Image (spheres, helix red, strand yellow):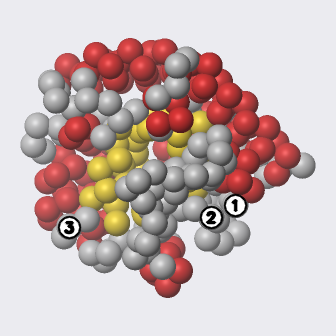
Amino acid sequence: MKYSDRAEYCKNTLAKKLLFLLDTKQTNLALSADVQKCDQLLALADLVGPEICVLKTHIDILEDFTPDLTRELRKLADKHQFLIFEDRKFADIGNTVKNQYAKGIYQIVEWADIVNAHSLPGPGIIQGLAEEGLKRERALLLLAEMSSQNNLLDPIYAEKTLEMAEQFPEFVIGFIAQRKLNTADQWIYMTPGVQRAAAGDNLGQQYISPEQAIQNGADIIIVGRGILHAKDPLAEAKYYREAGWKAYCERSK
């Protein structure tokens, strides 16, 4: 099915928006913008923004964060038509994550369209985040699988994560995973660790190609260092955009 055709199965408004965005903009590329300076992040978002559907941030690695940054990011998201995904990986009890999401210096719920969480603490983590996120039409991804070597998220954990998501379809829109977990059309899958050639780094990261990720069921490929460390980040983003979209079109035939 086309991305936009699946929107009718989603109960979350942002999920519908994202699926239509993928088809309209013809990109399934998410940039993992792991940089340490605000001006770097804004310049990168402006440069690569036309090529991506999602900008993924790690807001807490910025060395010079101010609230002005998130206001400028929102302007760029509107300008280039992409969503912002803060890769916070919440992993605590419901009341704690609720405060981490809405309060403190980052106030993530105010500017991030999407966040993610581990399912390890149980359904309370989703309930806590939903209390803040739903009233602002935000969305949550659950970590079902990771791309790091020897991680503990085994198939049983992934299945339990899927079962938990099914209890909260109005807020959970999908998964961070290396493969599609079931055939339901409502779930959006984002796959990290994508590079041109399958390899790895010295800290256990394992990479797969854009084509392999899409064949495994990914809706959105997440690319970080493959673009960030390129001599020409814009040209490299165009490559991943074209590779990901071509693989999706072939899968959709």
Residue position marked by numbered label 2 in the rendering: 179
Give the x, y percent position of residue 17: 56, 39
**Which label is found at residue 216?**
1
Q: Secondary structure at mark 3?
A: loop
Task: Judge whether 191 appears above or below 127 on screen.
Answer: above
Q: Residues within 10 Å of mark 1 (few under 14, many from 20)?
A: some
Q: Secondary structure at mark 2?
A: loop
The residue sitting at the right extreme is: 253
Name the residue at 62% across, 19% down. Answer: 235
Of callouts 2 and 3, the N-terminal one = 3
Of callouts 3 and 1, the N-terminal one = 3
Name the residue at 38% across, 15% down. Answer: 43
Q: Residues within 10 Å of mark 2 (few under 14, many from 20)?
A: many
Task: Judge whether 107 appears above or below 253 on screen.
Answer: above
Residue position marked by numbered label 3 in the rendering: 92
Quadrant position of residue 249: top right
Instruction: Give the amino acid at mark 2.
Output: Arg
Q: CA distance from mark 1 to mark 2?
A: 5 Å
Instruction: Give the amino acid at mark 1.
Output: Asn
Instruction: Give the amino acid at mark 3.
Output: Asp
Between label 3 and label 1, give the one nearer the viewer. Answer: 1
Give the x, y percent position of residue 193: 52, 50
